Image (cartoon, rainbow, N blue to C red):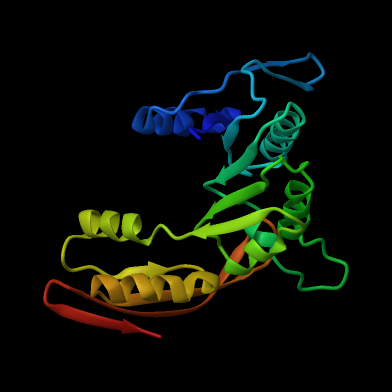
């Protein structure tokens, strides 16, 4: 069954490109803002007995709620199957707790999206290159998660930008293995920067491991 494509406001551009590539039909949503900032949404396109795909990222709380509200309404209107495509899953700075009582926002938002009513043929969510792979397991209940790796696209872009001789650097320890794997596939050295988060806006570099050669000379930092 050909899916009907919807999107959150800030991902309209990506849904439009998807429709252009696939010729899948585009779902229409009427939107407006009330003076107090409250958002109005109305699903204009008939979705009963349709396979529905929603493209949207959890860029912030407003964007997350927009996906939740839209998906819940579409299922309530009789969608046959619901697929969420989330190119960017936020909350990566709070994917685990370090101190007692900290809210693991990546998990609580996954639970929120997991509570979207289930379509007759089920719900599923596609997640792209998560900051930490275990986030995929934060989703609960009947929703099925699919973690998609964009390595072929990233390696092609890195080769196009860096040419044949460059160093692939990682600025976050949580992505070190992923960056090392990319570097191995590309046949280039990997460099790593280790940092410590001091607060919501400030980080401190605690170590650098890199070997960079330029103009015939080489430099190693550890």
Q: How many marks?
A: 0
What residue is shown at x 71% (from left), y 40% (from top)?
Answer: 119
Does residue 207 sit above or below 165 in this rendering?
A: below
What residue is shown at x 42% (from left), y 34% (from top)?
Answer: 18
- Can you say which quadrant of the picture contains the C terminus? bottom left
What residue is shown at x 17% (from left), y 60% (from top)?
Answer: 163
Indicate the position of residue 107 as horizontal and vertical percent values.
Answer: 74, 59
For residue 222, side relative to residue 133 (left or right): left
Q: Which residue extends farthest right? A: 101
Indicate the position of residue 82 as horizontal and vertical percent values.
Answer: 64, 40
Indicate the position of residue 75 as horizontal and vertical percent values.
Answer: 72, 33
For residue 10, side relative to residue 37 (left or right): left
Image quadrant in which you'd find residue 118: top right
Asked whether 185 or 37 is in front, the reply is 185
Image quadrant in which you'd find residue 180: bottom left
For residue 132, side relative to residue 166 (left or right): right
Q: Which residue extends farthest left? A: 216
Indicate the position of residue 173 as horizontal and vertical percent values.
Answer: 53, 74
Asked whether 28 or 98 is in front, the reply is 28
For residue 125, side relative to residue 65 (left or right): left
Does residue 191 sit above or below 24 in this rendering?
A: below
């Amino acid at each position: 069954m050909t899916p009907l494509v919807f999107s959150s406001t800030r991902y309209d551009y990506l849904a439009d490109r998807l429709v252009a590539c696939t010729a899948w039909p585009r779902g229409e949503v009427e939107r407006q803002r009330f003076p107090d900032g409250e958002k109005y949404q109305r699903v204009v396109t008939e979705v009963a007995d349709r396979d529905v795909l929603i493209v949207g990222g959890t860029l912030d709380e407003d964007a997350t709620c927009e996906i939740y509200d839209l998906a819940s309404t579409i299922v309530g209107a009789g969608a046959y199957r619901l697929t969420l495509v989330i190119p960017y899953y936020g909350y990566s700075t709070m994917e685990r707790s370090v101190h007692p009582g900290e809210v693991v926002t990546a998990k609580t938002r996954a639970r929120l999206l997991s509570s979207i009513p289930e379509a007759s043929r089920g719900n599923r969510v596609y997640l792209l290159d998560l900051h930490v792979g275990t986030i995929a397991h934060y989703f609960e209940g009947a929703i099925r998660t699919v973690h998609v790796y964009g390595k072929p696209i990233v390696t092609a872009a890195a080769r196009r930008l860096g040419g044949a001789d460059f160093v692939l650097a990682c600025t976050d320890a949580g992505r070190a293995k992923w960056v090392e794997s990319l570097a191995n596939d590309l046949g280039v050295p990997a460099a790593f920067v280790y940092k410590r988060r001091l607060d919501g806006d400030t980080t401190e570099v605690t170590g650098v491991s890199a070997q960079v050669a330029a103009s015939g000379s080489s430099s190693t930092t550890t």
